[in-house]
Image (cartoon, rainbow, N blue to C red):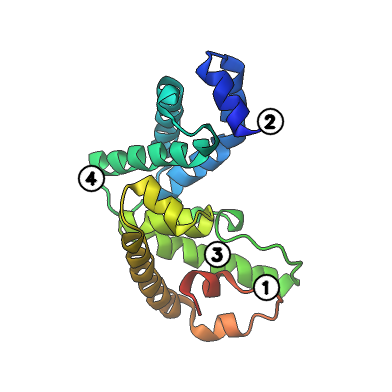
Amino acid sequence: MEDEILVQQLKKGNREAFDLLYEKYKNLVIRTAYLITGNRSDSEDVAQETFVKVYLHISELKNDSGFKPWMMQILVRTAYRMCKKRGKEVPDEEAERLSEDQAVSSRSILSPLGQMIKQEEAEMISEAVAALPVKQRTVVVLYYYNEFSVSAIAEMLNCREGTVKSRLHTARKFLKRELEDRMGIEVCRSERVQERSSYEIITGR
């Protein structure tokens, strides 16, 4: 069922519509909160608070078809507040354990060697992303992991598109430097798969 229909039903007090939206987006919300906060306990708190706010403030959503970016805006603000409350700019070591499917996804069928390189690459990217300042980390997560457009991210963060582009640019420079230090450019160049590597996608090489 489309979000627009579920939102309309939820605005009328239909609890089942909320349950369906929750089931549809809970994994996305928890994963995104985890990538931003870097802490599993905090991410669960952020996710819970996000859905509570969605339920309580759904009537404030003007465009019923725009539920997802509206919900993500709530999530990001909640995650920011959590990071500030914890006094954390860099996530803890849990963020380094993100699996490959939480990093940039790959649809190609890889050889055993390719799979090993992809896994190592994904872990290094996760560590590098975790080291970014929270605002740069957020735009990277939203843009690369969740595939939101620059304009959508700007709306979520209530900032200019130029600000989003600037944060992405700064983040890419940092990630490029970090990844080259960690793995060396030749690792990516030796990867013989059809699809671009996650290193290339993140750093724009």
Residue position marked by numbered label 1 in the rendering: 195
| Spot occupied by residue 61 in the image (x, y as percentages of width and height) | 44, 30
Looking at the picture, which amino acid does disc 3 mark? Ala
Looking at the picture, which amino acid does disc 2 mark? Met
- 3D distance between C-alphas at marks 1 and 4: 39 Å
* Local secondary structure at mark 3: helix
* Local secondary structure at mark 4: loop
Label 3 crowding class (10 Å Cα cut-off): few <14, some 14-19, many 20+? many
Label 2 vs 4, first from the N-terminus: 2
- 3D distance between C-alphas at marks 3 and 2: 34 Å
Label 1 vs 2, first from the N-terminus: 2
Q: Quadrant of the N terminus?
A: top right
Residue position marked by numbered label 2 in the rendering: 1
The residue depicted at 54 percent of the width and 71 percent of the height is: 201
| Spot occupied by residue 200 in the image (x, y as percentages of width and height) | 54, 75
| Spot occupied by residue 94 in the image (x, y as percentages of width and height) | 44, 50
Give the number of the disc on residue 122. 3
- 3D distance between C-alphas at marks 3 and 1: 14 Å
* Local secondary structure at mark 2: loop
| Any part of residue 137 in sight | yes
> Which one is in front in this view, the residue at disc 1 or the one at disc 4?
1
Give the number of the disc on residue 87. 4
Looking at the picture, which amino acid does disc 1 mark? Glu
- Report if the CB atoms under discs 1 and 2 are less than 8 Å apart: no
Label 1 vs 4, first from the N-terminus: 4
The residue depicted at 46 percent of the width and 28 percent of the height is: 51
Label 4 crowding class (10 Å Cα cut-off): few <14, some 14-19, many 20+? few
| Residue 51 against residue 39 in the figure, above or below | above
